[in-house]
Image: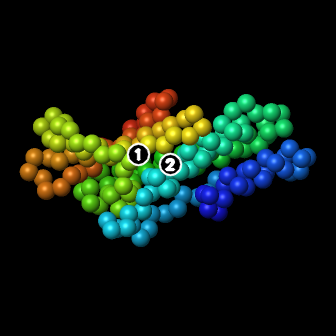
Amino acid sequence: MSPAARPVLLLLGLLASGCGGPQVVPPAPAVPPFRDCSVLAPCDAVRQQWFSNEAKDAELWATYCHLPTPTYASDCRGLESAIDKLHRLNVEAFSDLCSRFSGKRAADVYPLVGRPDREETAVCGTAQCRLWLWTWFGGGQSGTFTMLLKLPAGAPDWLLERCNYCTPFGCLDMPALR
């Protein structure tokens, strides 16, 4: 099932539950694998795979379940569970990616994550640092995924140092430390 079909199925399920029909919450889709990614055609996985889902899920939650009516209470519990499961899968997938690519060149990482929303450089101690940031907003919520790359003295390319994911509720450092 495509991520774009989830909101439609949820809406149909919520409408059916209001009419006395069965209460249906679509299952969380599986996280698609990284494939056919290259520097010339990056997968844009952070934006398309992770953050589009986070924003859509936040909008659905805010629209239908922020203050659920008794009619939607059961659907909202199912939706909350599906959203939590998909969120955990994405955090695990990107945490794993950060772990496997820690210390690897930016050119090796970029095809798998795609173009960041924002990029910054600064001095970090004795090295140069580069920060890739992706941000989402939706349903009154937000999140930022960050990849920190360092350019050690004399090194020919930026190397992935670590990643983290932050929301207004706190930050989660991903295990990308060497």
Above or below, 175 against 28 in this view is above
Where residue 76 appears, x then y in whole percent? 73, 40
At mark 2, the secondary structure is: helix
Q: CA distance from mark 2 to mark 1?
A: 8 Å
- Amino acid type at mark 2: Phe
In the picture, the quarter occupied by the N terminus is bottom right
Q: Are marks 2 and 1 in contact (CB under 8 Å)?
A: yes
Look at the image and tell me whether residue 26 can be seen: no
- Amino acid type at mark 1: Trp
Residue that numbered label 2 is attached to: 51
Where residue 19 appears, x then y in whole percent? 89, 47
Of the numbered discs in the image, which one, if any, rests on residue 134? 1
Number of labels in the image equals 2
Where residue 88 appears, x then y in whole percent? 54, 45
Would residue 106 be found to the left or right of residue 157 on screen?
right
Q: Name the residue: 60% across, 57% down.
A: 3
Of the numbered discs in the image, which one, if any, rests on residue 153? none
Q: Name the residue: 79% across, 51% down.
A: 13
Circle 1: is it few (<14), some (14-19), or many (20+) Cα within 10 Å? many
First in sequence, mark 2 or 1: give its number: 2
Query: Which one is nearer the viewer's eye here, 141 or 156?
Result: 141
Where residue 128 appears, x then y in whole percent? 17, 42
Look at the image and tell me whether residue 94 can be seen: yes
Residue lying furthest left: 154
Would residue 115 be found to the left or right of residue 47 on screen?
left
Above or below, 19 against 3 in this view is above
